[in-house]
Amino acid sequence: MIIYNEETRLFHLSSRTFSYILGVREGRLLTLYYGNPLPEETDLSYLAASYYSGSSFEQLEQNLPLEIPSVGTGWYGDPAVQAIGPDGNNITKLRFADYKILPHKEPLKGLPSVGVGSCKLENDETLEILLKDDLTGLQAILSYTVLQMQDGEMNALARSMRLVNGGQNELILTHMASAGFSLPSRRFDLLHLRGAWARERQIVRTPIGQGAIRIQSQRGASGHEENPFIALLAPETTEDSGPVYGLSLIYSGSFLAEAQVSPFDNTYVSIGLNPMTHQWHLQSGESFQCPEAVLVYSSKGLNRMSQTYHVLYRDHLCQSEWARKERPILINNWEATYFNFDERKLLSLAKKASSLGIELLVLDDGWFGVRNDDKRSLGDWYVNPEKLPHGLSGIAKKVNELGMKFGLWVEPEMISPDSDLYRSHPDWCLHAPGRSRTEGRNQLILDLSRKEVQDYLIRVLTGVFSSANISYVKWDMNRNMTESFSAGLPAHLQMETQHRYILGLYRVLREITEAFPQILFESCSGGGGRFDPGMLYFMPQTWTSDDSDAVERLKIQYGTSLVYPSSAMGAHVSAVPNHQVGRITSMNMRSDVAIGGNFGFELDLDKLSEKDLETARSYVNKLKDLRSLTARGVFTRLCSPFETNYTAWQFVDEKRVLLCFYRILAEPNPIPHRVYLKGLDPHKSYQVDEADASSLPPSLRQVFTGAALMEAGIPMIWDQSGDFVSRTIVFHQV
Ligand code: GLA
C-alpha cells in the first residue's frame, strides 16, 4: 500500500511486515522511518522537524536522515548521486519536485529486476518520486514497489533510480547508487558475505561505528570476494529474533554497498554501482537506469529475512520456465576426467550413471578446439573430432539412448590468445592502448560492450546449442576484468566500459535463454564468483563453489543461504581424497551435504567401490522423492558451522520435514547435542520416516509433536565415531 498525505507531506509505503515512511522538508527527501508496520495514518512529521534543531549549522545536511544524499551542500559522506555539470563543478542539489503512483511495476530497460515478465506479482503499485537539480537540470526518479508474497506474510521493497538529463548540457555521472536510506542509530552490526575462490560467501558480522565501511567489487563481476548484499542488524539480533535490514543488488558487475555512520547518530546505508569503476556521460534528454536493489526488513531475525529473499528469488525473479520445475540429478565429468576424455570414456560414465538413476550427463570443459589444457581455444566453439568423432549430436544421441539428457559447458565471454578467434579479431578483447594485456588463467575477456561481439556470440552459441539435443548448459566465466577499456569507445567514454559490458552480457543472455527455453541454464564463475540475482534472472541455478569438499561446503552453502534459495545452488558429490583440500569424507556425508542444493555428482563412477555405488544409488532414489521439498520447502538454519562443531538446517513443506545435521570433528565422550526444529505446527504430530527410523536409536523411532521438536528438541546421538559424520531425518506430518 502506498499513501501520500498532502498535508503532512509524508509518503507511507506499508505491508503487513514493514512500514517505510518518507518525508519532505525544505525540498529534501528524508527517510523518517523504516521498521515494524505502523498504522496508516501515523503522522511522523514531528521527526522531519526535529532534525532542524535551530543551531546555526542546521543548513548543513550532515545531520539529516537523507534518502539520497548528493554533494556540495553539507553532506560530507559519500554521496548516492554526483553529477559533474557543464561548469566543471560537482555540486548536485536534488530537491523534491513531484511524485506519481503507477498501477504496476515496470521492467527496467536493459536490466534484470524482480516481479516482472513471467514473474509479475499482484498489487505491484509503484511510487515514483522526482527530485530535481534546478541549475543543471539533473532529475532523479526514485522508484519504490512493495512486493507482497505468501498472502502478505512476506514482503520486500524493490528500489531503483533513473537519472535523466533535463538540462541543455552534458552531465557526467560519477555516483549512481540504486537505493539508500537512513536509520536513526549508530548501534548496528554489518553482515556481509566475504570470501575468495573455493571459499565463497563466508558470513562476517562486525559492529560498526562512526565512519564508513565499504563492501565492494571492482572486478567487473560481482565476485568471489564479496557478494552484492549487506545487512544491518541490531547487536542483539539472532537467526530468530531482532531487527534486520537486508539490501541485495540485482547486478552482476562491480558494485558498492556501504554503511556510513555520522557523528550525529545517523546510519546511512546504500547499494549500487561502484563509483571507482562506473561513470556515465548523459547528454541532454538522455536517461540512465541504475540497477534494482531489493530491501528486506525482518523483525524476526536472519532466518526470516533469508526466507523472504528465498521466495522472491526462487519464484519471482528468473524468467526461465525451469525456475519452477524440478531439476534433474546430474553427473558432470569435470572432476572425473578434467580435459582427459573421449567419447568412449564419457559413454562409460553415462552408462554407469544411468544405471544409478542419474538423469543428465554434463560434458564440461575441453570438448572444443584443441583444448587439452587451460591454455588455449576459448572462442573456438567447434568440436574436437579426436575426442568426439561423432560430434555433439553423436554423443548427445548416445547419451539420450541411455535414457539420460545431455548437457554442455561453455565459457562464451572469454578468448584465449592462442585461438583462431583471437588471431582473426585481436581487438575484440578488453584492453587499453599501449598497455600489455593481463591474462588470468591464460585468457582474456571478450569486449561485450561492443555490439558486433555480442552479435557474434549470439550467432555462434545459437549454432552450438542447435547442433545437438542439448538440455542443459553450464555458462562459465573464469576470470575478472583487467584493463577494462574498449576499442569500440572514444576516450571520454572509457569509464563506461564495465557497465556497457554487463548490459551487453544481459542482452546476450536474454536472447539466448529466450531462444532456447527448453534448456536448463546454470551459471558459474570459477565456482561461485558471480552468484548474484542478476544472473539468477536469466538462469535459475548457479554452481555454488569449485570447492566440492563436504566440510567446506557446509560453510559455503550456509553462507549462500543468507540470500539465495537452495534451488539456486548447485551441489555435487565428488571424489575423495577431495581435489581441493585432500580431505576424506564418507559417501554419506558428501551426499547429505549435496542434498542442500541441486543434487549431482562430479566424480569417476568407474572408480567407486560397490558399496559407494550402492550408497549413490540410494541417494539418487531418495532425492527423487525429496527434491520437491528441498527445492520448494521453507529452509531454516538451525546451527551454524561458523560458530560450532555442528551444522544443522531443515526444510519444511505442508507434509514433511527434512532435518539435516552434521558433526565436523569427533568428540570424546560426546554430549548428545540437541537440535531444536523451527516453524512447525506445535499441535501437529510428526513421525520419523520408516527408512530413517532403522538407523536411529529406538528412543527416537516415534511420533513427536511439533511442540516437542521445537521446544524440547531432539538429541543427536551418533552411532558413528570419527570425524565428518552426518544424519538426515525425514518426518511425515501425521
Ligand atoms: C571453472 C568451473 C569448474 C569447471 C572449470 C572448467 O573452474 O567452476 O566447475 O567447469 O572451470 O575449466
Image (cartoon, rainbow, N blue to C red):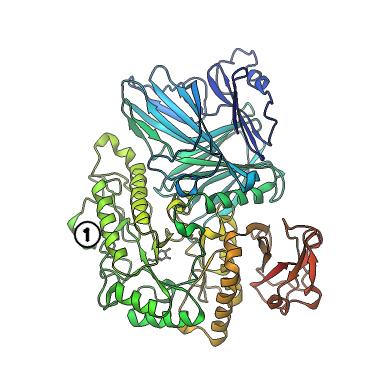
Q: Which quarter of the rendering shows the N terminus? A: top right
- Left or right: 399, with 54 as reference point: left
Write down which quadrant ligand 1 falls in: bottom left
Residue drawn at 52 percent across, 26 percent down: 76
Vertical position of residue 706 compared to residue 601: above or below: above
Residue drawn at 51 percent across, 68 percent down: 548
The residue pinned by badge 1 equals 421
Residue drawn at 31 percent across, 20 percent down: 168
One can see residue 47 in this view: yes
The residue closer to the viewer here, 141 or 664, is: 141
In percent of width and height, residue 327 lies at 50, 65
- Left or right: 367, with 293 as reference point: left
Q: Mark 1 near ligand 1 (CB under 8 Å)? A: no
Residue drawn at 37 percent across, 56 percent down: 513
The residue closer to the viewer here, 302 or 470, is: 470
The residue closer to the viewer here, 711 or 732, is: 732
Label 1, secondary structure: give it. Answer: helix
In percent of width and height, residue 188 lies at 65, 39
One can see residue 429 in this view: no
- What amino acid is labelled 1 in the image? Leu
Residue 597: image quadrant is bottom right
Vertical position of residue 74 compared to residue 666: above or below: above
Furthest residue toward bottom: 610
Q: Which quarter of the rendering shows the C terminus? A: bottom right
In percent of width and height, residue 103 lies at 51, 34
Vertical position of residue 222 compared to residue 581: above or below: above
